[in-house]
Image (cartoon, helix red, strand yellow):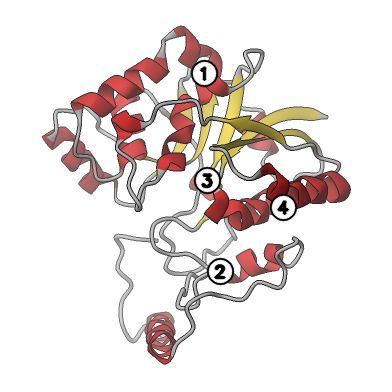
Amino acid sequence: MIKFNVFFATSKSYIQHFTVAATSLLENNKGLDINLYVIHDNINIIEFEKIIHFFKTNYKTELKLINIGHIDFSVFKPTLEYPKYTYFRLFLAVIAPTDIETALFLDSDLVVTGGISELANIDLTGKYICAVSEASVADNVKRLQALGSVAKSYFNAGVILVNLKWWRRKKITEKFITIANTYTKLDWVDQDILNICFANQWTKIDEKYNAVHLIRKKAVTPIIIHYASYSKPWIYADTHPYNNLYWQYLRLTPFKKYKAAGFSLHNFIMKFGRLTKRWLREAKVIKYDDKYK
């Protein structure tokens, strides 16, 4: 059985979504021996005990908690929109156990719908990081080049397979901090930092492993569906084409009684309008915006 190190980052407000994401991962990868790490910043462990018990009981998986509260994040200037846990992935090389040489980092706002053994089998020799291209590569490349970056491509940081051995050897964490100090106005913060650091030195993997900014269903359901940016299925007005999958896996967790937040007449009308627009697109009455997928 393949052993695979998978890392999530979470905060108090994202514990439910992490639980859904991790549940979907374990449900669909019972042939993988997954070491599941959870990076956090002083979450209430007593409150988290039911989640620890849930994974141990249902999946025989011991969550390995990594408290990152001792690290100074002031250089990144966290905000409400981009809180501290957004930057946790940048410290993988210094917080992961030293005997771990490779790791898969997953955002908590996603679901895994199938097997990821292909990712576990990728040979990372000579590679820094593997990822999936962003939806709007040209716009992001132009933006970073205007800041002085040499990047000719751009990836989404919600699913990254990293060579921790190389990150440590090349002191990548220190480079992230230097970039944060140098580029003080970045639109996509940690994702921009990663793209600047690994400009033209990252390896592309199939988009099925990080399907982002979807406005319609694919012919084949992606293996990892990432509810990136403002599309969050736990919000009532959300109309992501695969938001039902979040609820499917939620029903398997201790949060199964959760109801979508934000119901109101205004949001009902807005959601109906969005769904109507999708139906018109599917009926080819209006065109899709090809900028997104």
Point out residue 160 in the picture as x, y percentages from the top left corner.
50, 35
- At horizontal 56% and vertical 51% (from top left) the residue drawn is 12
Which badge, 2 or 3, comes first in the chain's sequence? 3
Name the disc covering residue 243, or none. Answer: 2
Q: Nearer the viewer, mark 3 or mark 1?
A: 1
Total numbered labels placed on residues in the image: 4
- At horizontal 33% and vertical 31% (from top left) the residue drawn is 74
Which badge, 4 or 1, comes first in the chain's sequence? 4
- Inter-mark Cα distance, 3 to 1: 19 Å
**Residue type at numbered disc 2:** Asn
Name the disc covering residue 94, or none. Answer: 1
Label 3 crowding class (10 Å Cα cut-off): few <14, some 14-19, many 20+? many
**Residue type at numbered disc 4:** Thr
**Residue type at numbered disc 3:** Asp
> In this rendering, does residue 5 appear at all?
yes
Which badge, 2 or 1, comes first in the chain's sequence? 1
> In this rendering, does residue 200 appear at all?
no
Q: Which residue has dot 3 on it?
A: 107
